[in-house]
Amino acid sequence: PMLAARCVSAEVRDTENKAQNTQKNTQKKDAKPDVYAEKLPVIIEELRMQNKQLVEEKDVQFIRLQFTDVSGNLKNVAITASQLERALDNKCMFDGSAIEGFVRIEESDMYLYADLNTFEILPWRPQHGG
């Protein structure tokens, strides 16, 4: 299977998390609820469950998180099915300095944020035409 992912530096990830927490803490009680924001966690959880269920049903052993470098070349990180939960929680890290044009070695800790809508089973085993 394959999942598209976006790369985020550890610093950006920390900043995004702080901004989300600040936004949650400063929302006005009188403000109208954002219907989309209320439904989003439910939608994300449904996608997570669908992806995990497919992995189990299809006896998936390896998953590739794919992304592009700054030149548009396709790159990927392979994980085992047992690491899927970490990938879905955006906790898969890699060394961004190993990819040309990404980051300096001092900023090399990168996270892959999986795009749950892009999960796709690719035929690999001979009995599946791969």
Image (cartoon, rainbow, N blue to C red):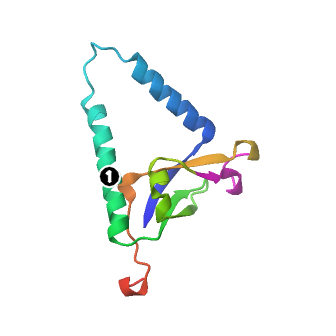
Q: Return the residue nearer the eye: 101 or 22.
A: 22
For residue 93, above or below residue 25: below
Q: Is residue 27 left or right of residue 67?
A: left
The residue depicted at 50 percent of the width and 58 percent of the height is: 83
Q: Which amino acid, mark 1?
A: Leu
| Mark 1 nearby-residue class (10 Å; few <14, some 14–19, many ≥20) | some
Q: How many labels does the image show?
A: 1
Q: Quadrant of the C terminus?
A: bottom left
Image x and y of residue 82, in percent: 48, 62
State the residue at coordinates (46%, 26%).
21
Residue 90 percent coordinates (x, y): 49, 47
Q: In which quarter of the image is the N terminus?
A: bottom left
Whether 128 is drawn above or below 11: the answer is below
Tell whether position 97 is magenta: yes
Residue that carries the numbered disc 1 in the rendered image: 47
Vertical relation: 28 (above or below) 94: above
What is the span of residues highlighted in magenta in the rendered image? Answer: 93-104
Occupied quadrant, residue 49: bottom left
For the residue labelled by badge 1, is the local secondary structure a helix, a strand or a loop? helix
Q: Which residue lies furthest to the bottom in this view?
A: 126
Q: From this viewpoint, which residue is outermost toward the right?
A: 105
Residue 37 sits in quarter:
top left
- Residue closer to the observer: 69 or 112: 112
Q: Which residue is drawn at 51% across and 60% down?
A: 66
Q: Residue 54 in the image: x percent, y percent?
A: 33, 65
Q: Residue at x 47, y 22 (%)?
A: 22
Q: Magenta segment: does it hold 4?
A: no
With 114 as the anchor, is 47 left or right in this view? left
Instruction: Spot the residue most to the front.
Output: 82
